[in-house]
Amino acid sequence: MNIFIPIIIIGVLLVITLILILADRLLGATGEKILNINNEQQIQIRGETTVLDALSAQKIFVPSACGGKANCGLCKVKINKGAGDIRPTEEPWLTEADREQNVRLSCQIKVRGEVDVEIPESMLSAEEYKTKVVHTEDLTHDIKLVRFKLIDPPTMDFKPGQYCQIEVPGIEDIRAYSIASDAKKNDELEFIIRYVPKGMATTFIHKAMQSGDTIKLTGPYGDFYLRDTDKPAVFIAGGSGKAPIRSILFQLRDQGFPKKVRYFFGARSKKDLYYTEEMRALEKEFDNFEYIPALSHPEPEDNWEGETGLITDVLDRMTGDLSGHEAYLCGSPGMLDACIEVLKKHDIPEEEVYFDKFA
Ligand SMILES: Cc1cc2nc3c(=O)[nH]c(=O)nc-3n(C[C@H](O)[C@H](O)[C@H](O)COP(=O)(O)OP(=O)(O)OC[C@H]3O[C@@H](n4cnc5c(N)ncnc54)[C@H](O)[C@@H]3O)c2cc1C
Ligand code: FES
């Protein structure tokens, strides 16, 4: 008799689970689902959808570079009601501050019942653009400059330092790329894109994309831009991290370089350097600007007489007390984290360090 008891318990649990799943499905399919946006707009949602997709259907373009797979952490928005508990997939991306302010990954939250989202003004201004590729150029063996002409809408106003999301045709996957061009020329955008072996977007951009192709992008996004202060600044970039810094340098040039800037650029060897002439011309024109390229592994044939070593070591060696300074960093997460530690050692206030991680 005793051997039947566990079987009966398992059977009962199975029936309860089935009833719960069925109830959830029925409620999900027929229950009213409402998305409130900034307490201003109320959207009725049909079927199963995430907050990210529901916003996108309203032409509100929240950044997302992994197609909703919880791999990029870019799709954060404040959800003040109806998000449920934090999901395991969100855990690695949410900081203490995010949790206190109800910030969640919008791609992981399904609209069930009533959901209240708070979208910052800066995100509401992002639009979808139809563009045409008008120029591509090899800057190094693995970095390309790509220029897009904006077709519809025909112009984009952006802050130098901000980024766009480019849609890879065919697979409709999107990736983030910083705008590398002069914000004054707002009918064309330039991007500096490094090839990632087996990378989905960069393989398309480097191996298949051609002048004349039509490409969809959204933007502008991000809060990596020059703060309006006269504090001296340290700029640090590696590889394609030069992109947003280049756009910021055009802005400073147009303003007559009102602040002192020392720009550290890390590369492996001479074949990884690009736009050196452009930087040297700026240096000649403005006493306030200094460009310091550093090679970690110069080749004998490079005949390199500049700085050598990892960019962190060069930064450490060449900087003194940085209190009263601000810093702008762009590149791979590993390089940025290491540089931030060096900056802290030189007493730069943490709140004066601005960065965009190309994760
Ligand atoms: C805000 C922001 C701005 C960015 N701006 C630029 C920019 O201006 N220029 C630019 O070139 N990139 C930029 N990136 C990175 C870009 O969005 C893509 O992640 C990158 O181009 C790789 O895309 P993919 O589809 O080719 O590779 P995926 O198919 O996404 O990845 C393929 C493989 O490569 C690995 N991988 C992904 N990225 C890198 C990397 N950078 N280095 C080494 N391995 C990698 C992945 O883990 C994966 O295993 C930016 C990222 C962010 C978040
Ligand atoms: S879209 Fe990448 S984490 Fe949500």
Image (spheres, helix red, strand yellow):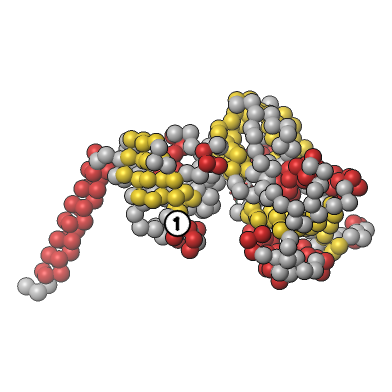
Q: Place residue 307 in its image quadrant.
A: bottom right
Amino acid type assigned to the residue bearing label 1 in the image: Gln
The residue at the point 63 percent across, 43 percent down is 163
Q: How far across and how far down the image is residue 44, in percent? A: 33, 35
Question: Nearest the camera: 35 or 18?
Answer: 35
Q: Place residue 236 in its image quadrant.
A: bottom right
Residue farthest to the front, as pictured: 230
Q: Which residue is mark 1?
A: 101
The residue at the point 75 percent across, 65 percent down is 322
Q: Is residue 280 visible?
A: no
The residue at the point 70 percent across, 56 percent down is 329
The residue at the point 41 percent across, 50 percent down is 79
Q: How far across and how far down the image is residue 342, in percent? A: 71, 68
Judged left or right of residue 88, residue 224 is: right
Residue farthest to the left, as pictured: 1
Q: For label 1, count other residues whose C-alpha is less than 10 Å away and answer few (under 14), some (14-19) or many (20+).
A: few
Q: Is residue 259 visible?
A: yes
Quadrant where the C terminus sits is bottom right
Q: How far across and how far down the image is residue 299, in percent? A: 86, 60
Question: Nearest the camera: 89 or 56?
Answer: 56
**Circle 1 SS class:** loop
Quadrant where the N terminus sits is bottom left
Judged left or right of residue 42, residue 267 is: right
**CB of residue at label 1: within 8 Å of ligand 2?**
no
Q: How far across and how far down the image is residue 271, in percent? A: 83, 52
Question: Nearest the camera: 151 or 21?
Answer: 151
Q: How many marks?
A: 1
Q: Is residue 228 above or below residue 130?
A: below
Q: Place residue 125 in its image quadrant.
A: top right
